[in-house]
Image (cartoon, rainbow, N blue to C red):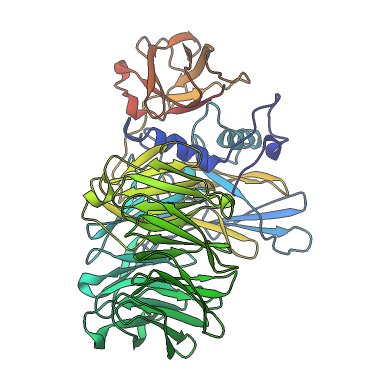
Amino acid sequence: MRSNYLATSIAGMNTTKSRPALIRPRLLVLLIVVLAGGFLQAPAQDRSPTGSPQFRSEHSYQSPQTYTREGVSVEFSIEPLALEEAKTTELLAGTEARVQFTIRDANGGNPLSNLRPVAWIDQREFAGAPDVKKCHKQIQSFMQSDLSKSPNIDLNTYFILALNHEPNISVIDPLSGFQGSRLYSLVSLPSSGEDWVMSSDNKRLYVSMPLVSQVAVIDTINWRLVASMNAGANPTRIALQHDGRYLWVGNDSTEEKASGITVIDTVSLKVATELRTGMGHHEIAFTDDDSLAFVTNKQSGTLSVINVRKLARLPDIDVGSRPTALAFSALSRALYVANEGDGTIVAVDGVRLTILARIKAQVGLETIRIPPNGRFGFVIGRATNTVAIFDVSTNRLVHVLPVESGADQIIFTRQFAYIRSTGSEFVTMIKLSELGKEAAVTRFPAGQKTPQESPAYSLADAIVPTPEDGAVLVANPGDKMIYFYTEGMAAPMGSFQNYGRDPKALLVLDKSLRENAPGVYATTVRLTGPGHYDVAFLLDSPRVVNCFDITIAENPGLPKSTAEAIKIEPVVTDKPARVGESYNLRFRVSNPVSREPDIGLKDLGVLIFLTPGIWNHRESAKAVGDGFYEASFIPPQSGVYYVYFECPSLSVHFNEVTPLTLQIVK
């Protein structure tokens, strides 16, 4: 779990009184965003002052900056990822850039691995070196849940990818968005996708397209379709080896001579081999070391075993009637095959390739999943609306539980198994820690309509965990929405629009800092408006806090954005905002260019609402001198509150000023 720091994580910052424990910044901001979804249009993210000079980049990947403290050396660099034809090394507004922190032992120069750095990029008004005290205050503000503003760019975020019924993929920025829209990008496909898989380095996305017999290859840095590879007849299920060497594509052809597997070399993007394995739908799994691949042949009733190194078939295994799904258990080192026709779960030894056991369940089995290193396997009986749970250590059933109509998918978080059902808007949850005893089953509604009310359907997962533990995203094509659910709640906390498209599957692309080489933590971001920026960096243990400096240049290819007419700065107090107690909200209003206070505004309005819009309060702010204003309200319950501002005399509307956030406690 990233950045789950306590207040002591930033001891030494400019604070005088104790504050509540800090919560995960990424999850906090996501909660705020999804709870407020649809209430107001998101404000523009470009906060550069009107009439600002033509910014030229002073720092690029050619001039890294280094900070050393407490025996730790942090080298920061940022490299533009502009298109080759641009031929520029400048950091341009609206383009992609690679941010990298290289962390070493300052004495020996050895890389420091397995750390949890977090970082933000936030604009400042003037050029020059970052102010150390302001840097510490910035980081403290970003880490807290009290009245504060958000950074321009959060390097602890992620993207939501929606595979749509239409021939495209929505890329949604759930935390900030860009220039007022959370639709970060829309990737067009030659045809509607059926299944997809992400490479382990998150740089490539592969999508099967049965109608055109191809697999699309997408560059996730620039969100461009880089190739459409021929992948055999009717390519449906796809799977990527753990080492990423080969992409395996199931060809569900109605002709025996074309039914089997196409194996694609991910380096050359060419077909390595085609194997005819048998008739029917094909599911694919691998041993942990990628030495063997397993392929089901539904109509033939067989399991094909393939030597991956030689790309050669071994003798088939007769597993039963209509094998529909399979999963490999790292714990038992066995493969489990679910048979739709006879209702059995067949355990196959992953080394000897012999049948270990046949577990009798119920006819109509469809999906089987085993959590990583998990002791229990889950098999959905769609015909009976049940889920059978078996123990991989004993190969025996331990539970058969009822689920909603049309259950078809299973995904896992650390705490729960989630069962999606096409015939119900409800998602079933099964607590993993209770298995083997008395299974604890709950459910929550993920929308108003059932998924089957849309023609959109995919083999890929419609429910995915978020990078932070304890939350999932649920696609409901019937509602054309993506719902955000946190464990322990009775209903989703909020939703994301898919802009009129039917989302049939989801993926999460984690864009936070990742260690991709010893001591090297990097990610890719899209830069916001031109100006001077602080890159605020925090390492909890060993503790290192610093702000680096970058300048983003004007991008002549982008239209001019409208700057905010006023600047709102909260006055943070040490008194917590509590339920049922009058809270005095104080803030400073100034001109964003001159920084002079705006005095005597008579029509400065404040809108405060409890997300997701179940309570709101409006009033006029009262001037208290020197550009400071205040408004009071009594929060009715705990939760996250948004604070918006308007000023008709300055033609400022509620959705045109960056809002403040406020956490109310009991």
Please identify the quarter of the rendering in which residue 644 is found. Answer: top left
Q: Horizontally, is 132 left or right of 249 in the view?
A: right
Compared with 312, 134 (above or below) is above
Q: Position of residue 174 (x, y in %)?
A: 41, 44
Q: How many marks?
A: 0
Task: Give the camera-side residue of 176 and 341.
Answer: 341
Quick check: can you spot residue 14? yes
> Based on the displayed image, in which of its 4 quarters is residue 187 positioned?
bottom left
Residue in the foreground of this view, choosing between 431 and 47 = 431
**Residue 90 shows up from this direction:** no
**Is residue 351 shown above or below 426?**
below
Quadrant the C terminus occupies = top right
Q: Nearer the viewer, residue 164 or 229?
A: 164
Query: Residue 279: image x %, image y %?
Result: 29, 82
Residue in front for this viewpoint, 280 or 241: 280
Decide if residue 163 is on the left or right side of residue 47: left
Q: Position of residue 276 (x, y in %)?
A: 32, 87
Task: Please state the horizontal and vertical placement of residue 92, each as a whole percent of the image.
Answer: 40, 51
Question: On the picture, is 23 further left or further right than 286?
Answer: right
